[in-house]
Structures are given as structure tokens and as C-alpha cells.
Amino acid sequence: MEKRVVISVRDIVEFILRSGSIDASYMGTKRAAEGIRIHQMLQRKRKKEAAANGFVYQAEVLLKIEYNYLDILFKVEGRADGLLTGDGIAVVEEIKSTMKPIEFIEDNPNHWHWAQAKFYAFMYCKENNIEEVGLCLTYCNVETEQTVEFKQALTRTELEAFFVDIIDKYHSFAQMDFYRIEQRKKTAEDLPFPYSSYRTGQRELAMSVYKAIANKKALFAQAPTGTGKTISTLFPAVKWLAKTDGKIFYVTAKTITRRVAEDALALMKTKGLKMRSVTLSAKEKLCLTGECKCNPIDCMYADGHFDRVNEAIKDIIQNETIIQRKNLAEYAKKHRICPFEYALDVAIFCDCVIGDYNHVYDPKAQIKRFFGDNAKEEFIILNDEAHNLVERAREMFSAELSLIDFTEIRAIFKTRQPRTYKLIGNIKGWFEGFSDGISVSKNLPEDFVSMLRDLAARIDLFITDHANADKADELIDKYFKILDFIRMSEFFDDKYVCYKQRFKKSMTVKLLCLDPSFLLAKTHKKCRAIFFSATLTPLTYFRDVFGGNSQDFGKVLASPFPRKNLCLLIDAKISTTYRNRTESIPRISKRVAELISEKSGNYFVFFSSYEYMTAVYENFTEQY
């Protein structure tokens, strides 16, 4: 098997050269947009200057290289911000936006910004067979638009030596990953079903899963409780990994079902499978301090995290195969790093990632390195208890704001930003215009969204300048709720409704996603998705809600329990209709007493309403 690594310039140099601390302090969400604007502004300026002097300046130049190093073929690609050519010279430019005053920026030849420029320069040299190239690293302040440039000229030999040094440092990680995939493929291919025999329906479900994956189709499977769905879906997915370099994402809404998946993998491990898994948890559950203050001042694990994390990754992947919350915490403490960020890095080097639905689907919590634009056909998504995904998906793609969200932060601006204070007053007035009760509209409240956009821009500037102000954390929380509402407004169409409610002083507006299919389908079109549950009826409904189509597969399995075990008794003499309920209460109490007196044990009695249940309960306890 040919060993190949396909990786971007940014990913490899950032992974090897990253250093320093995690700092999730607020930096201003306009930063990314400003960075794009700065890049485009400088690129336009460079083109004009180059043309005026008889040179050519190209922006966003795609560069690729294939490089054999030891036993691995590295395929590296990326886009250089700028390339100046003419009169026998070539200069590669890397542009970085910054909030730091220009006079305080120092030239650091070991920084990964320089590393990107050097990679692009070497790739250009090799592609064009030239012996020397110029490099320019440009920093531009996003507020003042002042720039500072650092320049150097390097030979092809010098650039290749740097390139090889980075490749060499990454090589050990690549080797471990190839060994993981090689061992997984070999043992997965030879893996027998981990039980001595199949339960009723298990072989049928396993074959359906494998067939769907092999044909790049989604599968919607209803299998009753007792079938053994976890092993019946994981086993064929593992067998498919014998043919690919992909991953399994096993996602569910409940912690207990994640543990069942871990147990299934542990069982297959006893049968010879060599495969690594990691279970992802929420940041709050993994945090070693319990405070989730991700900055070097408040958290010893955030301080210097990136200086130590790569060695920690090597440590755990060399010694563990089933990575859970407990051993993540142990290794994180040992290396003094953040376990949450650590888990996400470790997932790169795992065959199976176990987590919540939101790790795959939620735009706010999705693992960006795997999904979004980076999703791959080799990824298999196993959606356990899939009936829960309908409501969860609606919530993921919905957004809600209440009047109280604004009244709680308004006082912060009263003296500091009177215009912002007034704007929030206008928003307050918009809420107070609601009619009592509930109203539903198919129209987006454009006037409200427009005010939110204005407010978000004002809050962004305020927090950037007043990061340590009173109630700054509370303001940031509300700010992100506002941004979420604005983001969801961009999806608003006939699959949404605007839901308003007013009860006394409580006023709420919600962009409610009724049909999440189009958003779920964006992920499923790039991966192979399996949906399974004991309650997935009717299949066509769930297929449509999850973004499937008529070409996908459906499967309904019979109950594994003997039909003779079912006893259905109907008392047709008792009417439970609403008008006959008062009369039926003592008669139901009597029937229940007669039934449960036949055999000792535990019983459930179900009713059509809490009121009805309470009435029978009170009568029953009085009589019996």
C-alpha cells in the first residue's frame, strides 16, 4: 500500500509550529471579515503598483507539490496570498491582519507565518525550476491600515531544508497514523461477529447497513428494542473501514448510548480488532477546573497548552485504544493541557469518534475540521436513536430571543454609549408591540433583524474596547445569542415560521425551523449516513425530514421477541371518552385491581391525560 499524506500548507505548519496558550478571551467577531478586507485591499494595491512598474502581481495563487520523504509521499497544497513576478525575479507574499500596533510587531523567523511563506516559496521554486525566490511577510493593522513588511531572499536549497525539517517532524505522526490504519484494515477484515450467533434481525440489519455504505446511500432502519442495534450497525461499519481510510462518527442524544457504543468497540477489541476511538464530551464536563475560563491567566491548563499538546497526542495514541473522558483527563493532567481541545486533536488520529448529534450537525458546535466544507465520502455517520434527531435538528437551526435578553444589558450602555442605549430602547418597543398570546407568521421580521445587525456591530466594538467592564461576560453571552438569531435569519424561507408569544411581561420571538431537511442534507450528501431507532415510523417521513430521497434504503425489522409472549386484552364495556370519564373512573380502578392481583410484579398503567390518571389514582388508593 502506497503511503500518502494529503494536507494543506496551513494545517501542517500550524500543527508542527503552534505554540503558546489557549486564549478564548473576546477578540471581536468582525476580525475574520476585517482580515478578508485587508487582504483584498492590499492585493488590489499590489496589482496596481506592479503594473505601474512592469511587473505582474497575482493574488491567491494555488500551489501544489508532491514530495517523497523516506517512505511517504506528501501531497501539500495551498494558496499563496500574493506572487510578484517579472524581470527575472519572483517574490512570494504572505499577508496577515493584526490588532497589534504596527510598531510593536517584531520579525520572528521561527513563527509559523514565515513558515507558510517558506512553504509556498519552495513549492514555487520546485514547480518553476528556479534557484532563488524572495519572500515578503506583511502585517496590516485592521484599524489604522498601517503596514510593516519583513523581507528576505532564500535559495531553493535553503527552502527545501526548511520544508524537509517540517515534513520530518510531521513524519512520526503520519507513521503512527499509517500504522493505525494498516492495523485497523487488517484486523477489521478478519473480524468475526463478536457473538456466537446473531439475534433475530441482527444479520438482516448488519447486511442492510453494509449494503447502504457500499452503495453510498443513506439507510433508514427501524429495529425494535432487543435487536442489538449498536453492534448491528457498528460491526458492518467497521468491516467497511477495512476498505477505506475514513472514520466512523457514532452520534446520539444520550450519554448512556455512547457508553453502549464504547462497550461494543471494547467487545470487538477482544475478538482481535485494533482500532482507536475517542468519546467527545461537552467542554463543561471535561474542564479540569470546573470554570471553563479558557485563558492563560485563569487556567493553568490553557497556559502553554500548544507547547505541550503534540507530545500529549503521541503519548495517548501510543498507549490507548478506547479513549474516554476518564483517561483524557488523566493524560491532560499529566501534560498540563486543556482536555477539551486535546480531545478534538486526538480525534484526528482515531478511527471512531463517539459524540452528540451537535458534533456533526449543529452550526454552533460542529467539528469544523471534519465537517462543513471538509466532510468526506469516507466518513460514516451512525445516528443512534435517530427519532430524537428530528427535534434536536429543529432546535439546532432555530433561534430565540426574549425581551429580558435586552433589558438585562441595556443599563451597561446608558452612560457609555447613549445611542446604543436608545437602540435597545427601540428593540424593547418592538417587543412591547406584541399582542397577548401566541402569533405565528411566515414572514421574517426584517425590521427587527436590521436593528439586531446594528446592535451586534455596536456591541462588538464595545466589548473589544471594554473587555474587563462590569457584566462583560453577560454581555458576551447575549451578544452570541443575537449573532445566532442573525445567522438563522439568513436561512429563513418557507421551511421556517416566526413565532411570537406574549404572556404578561414575558415576550419572546423565535425563528422556528419546521423542516431541517435541507440543512441536514448538506452534511449527508458528503458522507454516508445511517439512521436507526426502535421508533422510525413512517420511514418515508423520517427519510424526508433527514434530507434523504427515494433512492436511499429503508428497512423495518420484526420484533425479536416471540409473538406468543404478547397478550392483548380489551374490555369493550368501559368507555374512556371524555363525556364518560367520571363514570369510568371506579370501573377502571376495579379492572386494574383485578388484573394485578393475578400475578405479583411491577405494572405500568397508561392514561390519555394527567388529569384522568390522577383521578383514577386517587380512586384506586381509596378503594384498594
Image (spheres, rainbow, N blue to C red):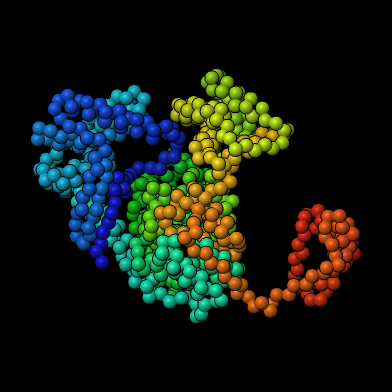
x 59%, y 26%: residue = 427
x 45%, y 72%: residue = 268
Q: Residue furthest front?
A: 550
In front here: 392 or 152? 392
In front here: 536 or 10? 536
Q: Which quadrant of the figure contains the N terminus?
A: bottom left
In front here: 538 or 586? 538
Left or right placement of residue 239 versus residue 507 in this view? left
Left or right placement of residue 311 versus residue 592 in this view? left
In this rendering, the answer to whether 39 lies above or below 587 is above
Point out residue 170 in the picture as x, y percentages from the top left corner: 27, 54
Point out residue 403 in the picture as x, y percentages from the top left corner: 63, 32
Number of numbered discs on residues? 0
x 56%, y 57%: residue = 542
In this rendering, the answer to whether 2 lies above or below 98 is below
Can residue 190 be seen at all in this image of the molecule?
Answer: yes
Can residue 108 be seen at all in this image of the molecule?
Answer: no
Left or right placement of residue 176 versus residue 64 in this view? right
Q: Which quadrant of the figure contains the C terminus?
A: bottom right
In this rendering, the answer to whether 417 lies above or below 338 is above
In front here: 205 or 150? 205
Point out residue 618 in the picture as x, y percentages from the top left corner: 86, 58
x 53%, y 48%: residue = 516
Among the 4 quarters of the image, the one containing residue 186: bottom left
